[in-house]
Image: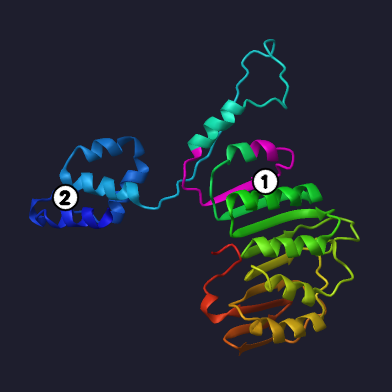
Amino acid sequence: MVELINLKMKAIAFEDLSFVERLPREIIWKIFEETPDCILNFRQTSRVLKCFVDEYAVQSISPNLKLDCKMKITMQNYVYYVKRQVYDYDLMDSLRECIGCRVKEVDIVYCEHRFREISIMLKGKKFKRMVFVVATLSDYVAKYIMKFNVVHNNDHLSLIMHKVSVSDPVNILLELSSRFKSLEIKQGYIKKNDNAYLFGLKSVDWAPIILDMFSRRLDKLFMVNTWRIQLSNKDVDILKERLPNIGKKVWFATLYFFPWQPDLEYVCNDHKVKVFNGFVSIIHRSREHELTATHI
């Protein structure tokens, strides 16, 4: 389709074009983005602009869709009380149609009690990136994360939480590593909580867990805990030695291990190994441009 449009454009002499038609493609597309209501009018203006519009329409552009719902009560005496838990599933179907087919990322933020409605609204959609923000990672939440992955075939998961109450944290980590290629795990600060360790794991050897995670589908892992993570010097030494030789192009980084090792940086089996100021990373040199775990 794009090649056909380019051939049509070449058939039109440059001197016959108007000043608008001579603009670079990127600028004309920017005009289309700023004036979506006028795109059909542009298409009817000239053959050149028609080509630009047709080309713009077939590009892989993922528009951001923001749904705002506002209610203004002008007279307080006329207030009607409604049941908040009642959902119109025809409305959910309509919202699903509004989303369109090209979805790049879905963020589910503090919606632990709305998973059923979200499932209906996202039915039939495929998207590679999923972000879950929850107050507490429970077995119920973990179950729905797995379910969303099965239905929508995601590659990346960003999991951001404050507390963890799952019955088997290590098994959840391994299950996530079997389903996702890329994981970003962040745990926020919990005030006056003695169990504020990453995934609630205090007395555990992290190196075997991380190596087991990378032996599965996972090839990228970023872990951050704003409180503390029990990644010992022994764990760091094991990961520095074995992750570069695990048989895949690894991207791994984590913060806040203790006690800190001396700063160092070297290359092992085409992986850059870096330890600096409480930060350790082991990243294949072909993936150094991927600055964070959210980059796919």
The amino acid at mark 1 is: Val
Q: Hey, what amino acid is under mark 2?
A: Phe
Q: Name the residue under label 1.
A: 109
Report if residue 2 is visible in the image.
yes
**x 66%, y 81%: residue:** 246
Q: In this view, does 168 lie above or below 43?
A: below
In this rendered view, identify the residue nearer to me: 87 or 254: 87
- Asked if residue 105 is among those painted magenta in the image, a careful observer would answer yes
| Numbered label attached to residue 222 | none
> Can residue 101 be found in the magenta stretch?
yes
Looking at the rendering, in which quadrant would you find the C terminus?
bottom right
Q: Which of marks 2 and 1 is in front?
A: 1
In the rendered image, residue 286, in percent from the top left (x then y), is placed at 51, 78
Q: What span is in magenta?
A: 99-118
State the SS at label 1.
strand
Q: How far apart are marks 2 and 1 (CA)?
A: 47 Å
Q: In this view, does 133 lie to the left or right of 62?
A: right
Rendered location of residue 38, percent (x, y) = 30, 36
Q: Residues within 10 Å of mark 1 (few under 14, many from 20)?
A: few
Q: Is mark 2 on a helix, strand or loop?
A: loop
Q: Name the residue under label 2.
A: 19
The foreground one among 86 and 84 is 86
* Residue at (54, 43) in percent of width and height: 124
Residue 194 is situated, as x and y percent measured from the top left of the image, at 91, 61
Q: Where is residue 118 in the image (x, y as percent from the top left)?
A: 64, 39
